[in-house]
Amino acid sequence: MDPTVIVAALGFVATLLATSLASRWQRLGAREARLFDARVRSYSDCAGALYEYERAVYHRVKTRFEGGLEQAERAQIRQQAWSSNAAARAAIAPVSLLSSIPNLSQDLEAVRSRIGDMNDATGLDDLLGRHSDIQEELHRILATARADLAA
């Protein structure tokens, strides 16, 4: 066999192999970028939903302690808290699918439950203590999520 044909065939095969490998690496890189973007978006949406739910419940309980609201206003505040709860619950689901952190969705669900427990506060001091504890827990979970994104 002619050495020129062998060299040409090797060059052709090497070009095909290099093109194939480059294409595969590009797809993997693009996939990782899409997953990273989805993780950032899901963490952000979930944090925003939990903070909004906490704000709505805090406002609801605080106005209950302060009194003076009419039935229609109380119903509107209650509806806002319920809607925020549903949004927080819905925001936890994508995090559980995308996160590489073990038990993150369970931690987020526990915080969501603790936010709902603010309704059981016995006074403003109790409410402020629960509010502070929940804020600290949310900050801890977000620090964990940031570490996951940085890794």
Image: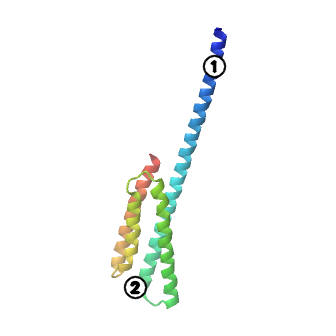
In this rendering, would 145 be left or right of 121? right
Q: How is the image coloured?
A: rainbow
Q: Residues within 10 Å of mark 1 (few under 14, many from 20)?
A: few
Which residue does the image show at 48% across and 53% down from the upper left? Answer: 98
Q: Which of the 4 quarters of the picture holds residue 23?
A: top right
Q: Are marks 2 and 1 in contact (CB under 8 Å)?
A: no
Toward the front, the furthest residue is 1
Relative to the observer, which residue lies in front, 102 or 69? 102
Examine the rendering and report whether any part of residue 139 can be seen. Answer: no
**Of the numbered discs in the image, which one, if any, rests on residue 11?**
1
Q: Which residue is mark 2?
A: 65
Examine the rendering and report whether any part of residue 134 can be seen. Answer: yes
Q: Secondary structure at mark 2?
A: helix
Quadrant the N terminus occupies: top right
Relative to the observer, which residue lies in front, 58 or 18? 18
Which residue does the image show at 63% across and 13% down from the upper left? Answer: 6
Residue type at mark 2 is: Phe
Q: CA distance from mark 2 to mark 1?
A: 80 Å
Which circle's residue, 2 or 1, is located before the other in the chain? 1
Q: Residues within 10 Å of mark 2 (few under 14, many from 20)?
A: some
